[in-house]
Amino acid sequence: MKKKVILSLLAVSAMCVNLTGIFKDDFFLRKLGEILFFFPLILYYLRKIPFKNFNFLMFLSMAMGATLFSWGGSMWYFEHIKLGMWLIGYIFLAREAIKHTEYERGNRFTTLYFIGVIAIYVYLLWVHIIEIERNLGHELAFWIYVLYYLNILFVAITALVYYLNSFSKKSVFYICFALSFIFSDILRDMEVFYFRDLSVEIVASLIKFAAIKLVFLFFVTPEKKLRLLHLV
């Protein structure tokens, strides 16, 4: 028990280092907190982590790699490499969800609701891409962002399909971290392309930390259907 408490405190400390960097506008502290957050999380779930799971290993390596490359900031192509690594990591998360998805025919309302949500998201995504195109320096960056957000769209669709067909605790973790990644990316783009606001940066950072934690919970949780009572 003491070990878990210490590791939890170390994870919180890493978050505090990151938030201190945001408050003080210190790039080094921000990035240090981001990379340090992974280590107590790995040690906390060490006995439960499925190290033989290729999708988990690929996501973890891509996420940590993207965090390391983000130290390069706007120098060279570090920002593009970082986005590319997150993009690859999201693909392996979607692969894991697809592996656990059992298709069941839904009613007409559920189908229409699903199509409606996806249509709205596609429209908003297209508007957002058009807006950020004006602020991007060259065409390569634009197409990387297009691929990145199409991938996020794929993760969102996978999350909805998985949740609606699985109705398990594992699927709840998946849809929660999928939404968290989407919101953190939206807030990140607000900071990069529109205006810099301290509260936006803090919320985006906290949501990203929560998303990574939820990814670990997703992989260490066995697939088991829930009763409705357990979700209320």
Image (cartoon, helix red, strand yellow):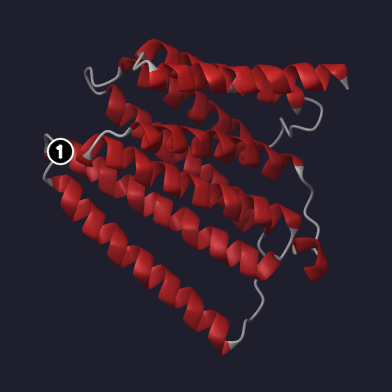
Residue 104's spot in the image, x, y percent?
67, 76
Q: Place residue 12 in its image quadrant.
A: top right
Task: Classify 137 as above or below 108.
Answer: above
Label 1: few (<14), some (14–19) or many (≥20) C-alpha neighbours in 10 Å: few
Q: Which residue is tagged 1?
A: 136
User: In which quadrant of the rendered image does the C terminus lie?
Assistant: bottom right
Question: In terms of image quadrants, where is residue 50?
Answer: top right
Between 108 and 180, which is closer to the camera in this rendering? 180
Observer-nearest of 4 and 223: 4
Image point (29%, 27%), residue name: 79
Residue 208 percent coordinates (x, y): 50, 36
Left or right: residue 77 compared with residue 116: left
Q: Which quarter shows the N terminus? A: top right
Question: Is 150 on the left or on the right of 109, as rendered?
Answer: left
Residue 193 x/y as whole percent = 21, 39
Q: Is residue 54 left or right of residue 8?
A: left
The answer to whether one can see residue 69 in this image is: no
Tag 1's secondary structure? loop
Determine the residue positioned at 60% across, 57% down.
Answer: 98
- Asked if residue 13 can be seen in this view, the reply is yes
Q: Quadrant of residue 196?
A: top left
* Location of residue 52 in the rendering, given as x and y in whole percent from the top left corner: 72, 33
Q: Residue furthest top?
A: 28
Say which amino acid is labelled 1: Leu
> Residue placed at 44% from the left, 76% from the top?
115
